[in-house]
Image: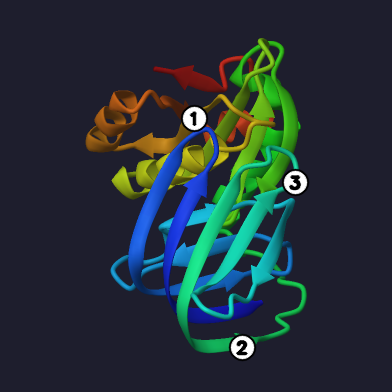
Amino acid sequence: MRLVIARCSVDYVGRLTAHLPMAPRLILIKADGSVSIHADDRAFKPLNWMNPPCKLREETVADGPDQWTVTHGKSGEKLVLTIEEVMHDTSHELGKDPGLQKDGVESHLQELLAEHITTLGEGYTLIRREFPTAIGPVDILCRDAGNATVAVELKRRGDIDGVEQLTRYLELLNRDPQLAPVRGVFAAQEIKPQARVLAEDRGISCVVLDYDALRGIEPDVLRLF
């Protein structure tokens, strides 16, 4: 992983356009090719990013600021960084990550639902568990009977933080033309009322899971709201 702290501006050029004015920022360039730009005023969500497959081209300009261009290999969309000053530039080999060790029940819920994905509805098919993104893995990514992409976030107890997490995943996944449009399903053994209201306001479906029933694969495993 390469970490660069630089004074830069950022322009996203594609289906949508976005501009970040000149300011000091952290640029993360990961081994998978993804590039993300971060500020110091949020926990982990990047200001802008480009998912793999993508290619970074660095251009040195003699009489002006350097320019870095990140081009997506499939969509052709670009992330253009104008670098005024580099304050730090270092690379580190992190090696293979063992992955997130989930709570036993939550992990088993994910395993059971992935194995019996049609409990979400007839015609559902699994894409994969722990689908990787630049901001963390999506618990389950699947397709519904109409072949639309569905991202599923699983929790033992569903609260507002879980809905916010799924919202961030959906924002990111819907920028991938190979997956979009992507809708969300928030699934938990118990969903707090405030979380349900927020999810429904954002077009996210809520599913209450019966862990014991799902272990037995009974026909009424889920109650959809």
Residue 91 locus on image (x, y percent): 66, 85
The answer to whether residue 45 is above or below residue 190 is below
Viewer-proximal residue among 90 and 179: 90
Residue 87 placement, left or right of 138: left
Residue 1 placement, left or right of 175: right
- Mark 3 residue type: Gly
Residue at figure coordinates x 67%, y 51% from the top left: 71
Residue 110 locus on image (x, y percent): 63, 42
Look at mark 2 in the image and give the residue it sits on. Answer: 90
Look at mark 1 in the image and give the residue it sits on. Answer: 184
> Quadrant where the N terminus lies?
bottom right
- Mark 1 residue type: Gly
Viewer-proximal residue among 5 and 179: 5
Mark 1 and mark 3 lie on one chain; the one further toward the N terminus is 3
Whole-number angstrom distance, CA of label 1 to CA of label 3 = 26 Å
Residue 60 placement: quadrant: bottom right
Does dot 1 land on a helix, a strand or a loop? strand
Look at mark 3 in the image and give the residue it sits on. Answer: 73
Mark 1 or mark 3: which is in front? 3
> Dot 1, how many residues are within 10 Å of its Cα: few (below 14), some (14-19), or many (20+)?
many
The answer to whether residue 92 is above or below residue 120 is below
- Mark 2 residue type: Thr
Does dot 3 land on a helix, a strand or a loop? loop
> Quadrant where the C terminus lies?
top left
The answer to whether residue 81 is above or below residue 113 is below
Whole-number angstrom distance, CA of label 2 to CA of label 3 = 25 Å
Mark 2 and mark 1 lie on one chain; the one further toward the N terminus is 2
Pick out the residue farthest to the left. 194
Mark 2 or mark 1: which is in front? 2
Residue 116 locus on image (x, y percent): 72, 27
Q: Is mark 1 in CB contact (under 8 Å) with mark 3?
A: no
